[in-house]
Image (tube, helix red, strand yellow):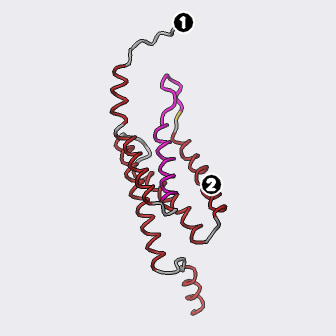
């Protein structure tokens, strides 16, 4: 019975010390917060990928970086991990894009870009680049919340003519 107890304890001994545990908790919580901020706009816009999706994407990307860091992999190996995260998130993004057969064309491009960018923020948090992650979240928030006001005013000023020009 003692041997089983020792095996169980060794299986749950990922962290070398309390400091490592605190770093992982802070990074994952920050990833959840930053991802949630970006997902909030998508959810308020009535999009399928909202707060929870963005939180999970950001935390997942951070976790995919944290685990290899804990294992002590080299920089070149970390590069491959990051490439895998980027490629993998592309499949999720592709699923959020719907190609319509009517005049609207493709929809979901902004949501897909937001998911992709949220994953990049998660990678940044996972690497311990918290200031960069916060700055990028603020910039993305500006794009999602502020830019639509400008683009609406531009669309209103655009001429309504849709006749083809004879070029």
Residue 153, placed above or below residue 37: above
The residue nearer to you, when weighing 55 against 76, is 76
Which labelled disc corresponds to residue 149? none
Mark 1 lies on a secondary structure that is: loop
Where does the image place residue 127, in percent across and percent down from the top left?
A: 52, 62
Q: Residue furthest bottom?
A: 2
Which badge, 2 or 1, is on the more N-terminal residue? 2
Image position of 148 (left or right of 103):
left
Q: Residue at x 56, y 49 (%)?
A: 89
Mark 2 lies on a secondary structure that is: helix
Q: Residue at x 60, y 91 (%)?
A: 3
The residue nearer to you, when weighing 160 against 74, is 74
Image position of 87 (left or right of 29):
right
The residue nearer to you, when weighing 155 against 115, is 155
Image position of 89 (left or right of 160):
right
Say if the magenta span includes residue 100.
yes
Residue 156, placed above or below residue 58: above
> In this rendering, which labeled residue sits more in front, label 2 or label 1?
1
The residue nearer to you, when weighing 79 against 57, is 79
Q: What is the quadrant of residue 152 in the picture?
A: top left
Q: Are marks 2 and 1 in contact (CB under 8 Å)?
A: no
Q: Which residue is labeled 1 in the image? A: 166
Please identify the quadrant where the C terminus is shown.
Answer: top right
Where does the image place residue 44, in percent across and percent down from the top left?
A: 34, 43
Q: Residue at x 42, y 12 (%)?
A: 161
Where does the image place residue 6, in percent across and percent down from the top left?
A: 57, 88
Please identify the quadrant where the N terminus is shown.
Answer: bottom right
Q: Which residue is labeled 2 in the image? A: 84
Decide: few, some or many residues near mark 1? Use Cα within 10 Å; few <14, some 14-19, many ≥20. few
Say if the magenta span includes residue 109.
yes
What are the residue bounds of the magenta stretch? 99-124
């Amino acid at each position: 019975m003692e041997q089983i107890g020792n095996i169980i304890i060794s299986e749950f001994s990922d962290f070398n010390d309390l400091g490592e545990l605190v770093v992982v908790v802070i990074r994952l919580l920050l990833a959840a917060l930053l991802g949630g901020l970006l997902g909030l706009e998508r959810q308020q816009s009535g999009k399928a990928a909202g707060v929870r999706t963005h939180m999970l994407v950001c935390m997942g990307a951070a976790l995919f970086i944290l685990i290899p860091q804990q294992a002590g992999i080299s920089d070149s190996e970390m590069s491959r991990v990051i490439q895998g995260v980027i490629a993998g998130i592309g499949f999720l993004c592709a699923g959020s894009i719907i190609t319509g057969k009517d005049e609207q064309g493709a929809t979901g491009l902004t949501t897909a870009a937001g998911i992709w960018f949220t994953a990049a923020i998660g990678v940044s948090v996972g690497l311990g680049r918290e200031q960069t992650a916060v700055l990028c979240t603020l910039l993305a928030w500006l794009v999602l919340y502020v830019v639509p006001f400008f683009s609406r005013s531009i669309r209103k000023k655009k001429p309504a003519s849709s006749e083809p020009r004879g070029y």
